[in-house]
């Protein structure tokens, strides 16, 4: 009864399985169930001990009482405890469901005795500040991750990754997956109309932020499918017609968890948001597709875009663009670069050495050797990364810097 899978039991109860319904009803009050089972168990054991003692006294005398007790202990352990309980633990549903019918009847018959026993036991538990009626078995996020991973063939591997991706949404914020400001493609109304027409003609994005001079002066979001409305009947392009076609920009803080933002997108009927910091400055852009990719994997991202910033070398190292995000590098190369702080490779290097590096500067982060190849006064452009040759065992981060 106690080793029944509670979640499978609830599933069977929902399907109106009679044995499961009886077992579930008994398990709703475990103190009563345990009291009933132990009442019968101890009664039988004590009765058997008394009978064995009487038989030993009448047939063989007092000298055989200890021998009878030893033999009875072995018999009870083998045939009354270890063997049947192991068998029941291996086949809980096969044993518990039929037994639930018997236990239900016994509970009605012996309820007064069980009630007295439970009242005394519960009083003792109350003194110990325990709550015997608490039967909730809620799983934590980490426990649920273990359940999903150990499901084996019951859940396809791809579906396991999707379920784990949903569980990980709470750990990740929009800052971790956003398109950084420097990579945002938008429409600057101060540009020439011919340039804007060419830009829209070859644009690969569905929605574009529209701004004047700077992204911080965003006036709206333009859906590219409405581009035909920017042309008059004579086919002449005019950017002045774009204003009525814009939707109001939607802003979100950098620290918003992904599961919260997914709900916000659904509630506000939006698919794109501009990410702002505590000062109100735009730091990046996040879309609904970006969040969905965290769950189901990449389906809109061009894999060639990432291979353009991660170049494998013959010696086993990788030349990586400084603007590449650490999450994408880890996902693409199966690495474990730290992603708690900095979001890009450039940010990780600057966070580690706390100064602007010069070409040739090397450092070690969590077993990975990073060498700056190209750098400007503002950022690292290219770095050579050497992955660790063997699995790291140290729990603390090892960082060394060589100029």
Image: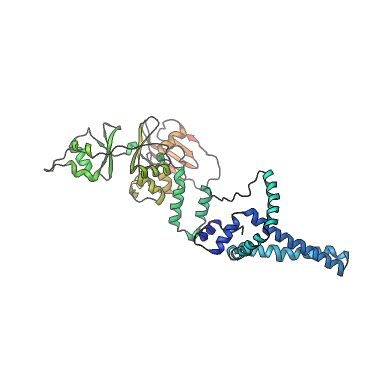
Q: Does residue 146 lie above or below 257 as drawn?
A: below
Say which residue appears at 19% left-offset and 44% top-offset: 228
- In the shown orientation, is residue 273 left or right of residue 84? left
Q: Which is nearer the eye, 376 or 157? A: 157
Does residue 111 show up?
yes
Q: Which is nearer the eye, 222 or 328? A: 222
Q: Which is nearer the eye, 58 or 33? A: 33
Residue 200: image quadrant is top left
Residue 127: image quadrant is top right
Which residue is farthest bottom?
59
Where is residue 251? Give x, y as percent. Answer: 35, 36
- In the shown orientation, is residue 245 left or right of residue 392? left
Quarter of the image that includes the C terminus: top left
Where is residue 64? Give x, y as percent. Answer: 85, 65
- In the shown orientation, is residue 191 left or right of residue 249? left
Quarter of the image that includes the N terminus: bottom right
Does residue 403 show up?
no
Where is residue 142? Give x, y as percent. Answer: 52, 48
Say which residue appears at 47% left-offset and 58% top-offset: 155
Q: Which is nearer the eye, 177 or 342? A: 177
Residue 193: image quadrant is top left
Q: Does residue 334 lie above or below 354 as drawn?
A: below
Which residue is farthest left?
234
Type of colouring: rainbow
Count of marks overlaid on the render: 0
Where is residue 267? Give x, y as percent. Answer: 37, 43
């Amino acid at each position: 009864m106690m080793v029944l899978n509670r979640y499978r039991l609830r599933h069977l109860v929902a399907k109106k399985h009679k044995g499961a319904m009886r077992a579930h009803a008994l398990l709703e009050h475990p103190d009563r169930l345990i009291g009933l089972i132990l009442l019968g168990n101890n009664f039988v054991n004590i009765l058997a001990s008394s009978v064995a003692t009487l038989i030993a006294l009448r047939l063989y005398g007092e000298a055989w009482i200890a021998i009878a007790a030893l033999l009875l202990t072995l018999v009870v352990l083998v045939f009354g405890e270890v063997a049947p309980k192991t068998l029941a633990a291996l086949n809980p549903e096969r044993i518990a469901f039929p037994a639930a019918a018997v236990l239900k009847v016994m509970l009605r018959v012996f309820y007064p005795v069980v009630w007295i026993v439970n009242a005394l036991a519960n009083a003792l538990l109350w003194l110990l500040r325990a709550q015997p009626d608490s039967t909730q078995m809620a799983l934590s996020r980490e426990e649920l991750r273990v359940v999903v991973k150990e499901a084996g063939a019951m859940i396809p591997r791809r579906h396991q990754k999707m379920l784990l991706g949903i569980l990980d949404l709470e750990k990740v914020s929009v800052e971790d997956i956003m398109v950084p400001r420097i990579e945002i493609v938008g429409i600057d109304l101060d540009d020439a109309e011919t340039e804007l027409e060419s830009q829209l003609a070859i644009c690969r994005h569905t929605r574009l932020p529209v701004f004047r001079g700077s992204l911080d002066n965003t006036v709206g979001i333009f859906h590219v499918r409405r581009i035909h409305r920017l042309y008059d009947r004579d086919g002449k392009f005019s950017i002045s017609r774009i204003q009525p076609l814009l939707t109001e920009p939607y802003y979100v803080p950098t620290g918003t968890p992904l599961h919260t933002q997914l709900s916000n997108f659904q509630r506000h009927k939006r698919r794109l948001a501009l990410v702002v910091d505590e000062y109100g400055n735009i730091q990046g852009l996040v879309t609904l597709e970006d969040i969905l990719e965290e769950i189901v994997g990449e389906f809109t991202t061009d894999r060639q875009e990432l291979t353009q910033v991660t170049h494998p070398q013959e010696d086993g190292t990788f030349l990586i663009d400084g603007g590449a995000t650490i999450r994408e590098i880890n996902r693409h190369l199966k690495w474990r670069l730290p992603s708690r702080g900095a979001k890009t490779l450039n940010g990780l290097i600057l966070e580690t050495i706390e100064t602007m590096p010069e070409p040739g500067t090397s450092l070690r982060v969590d077993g990975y050797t990073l060498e700056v190849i190209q750098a400007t006064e503002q950022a690292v452009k290219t770095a050579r990364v050497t992955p660790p040759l063997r699995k790291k065992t140290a729990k603390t981060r090892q960082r060394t810097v060589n100029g």
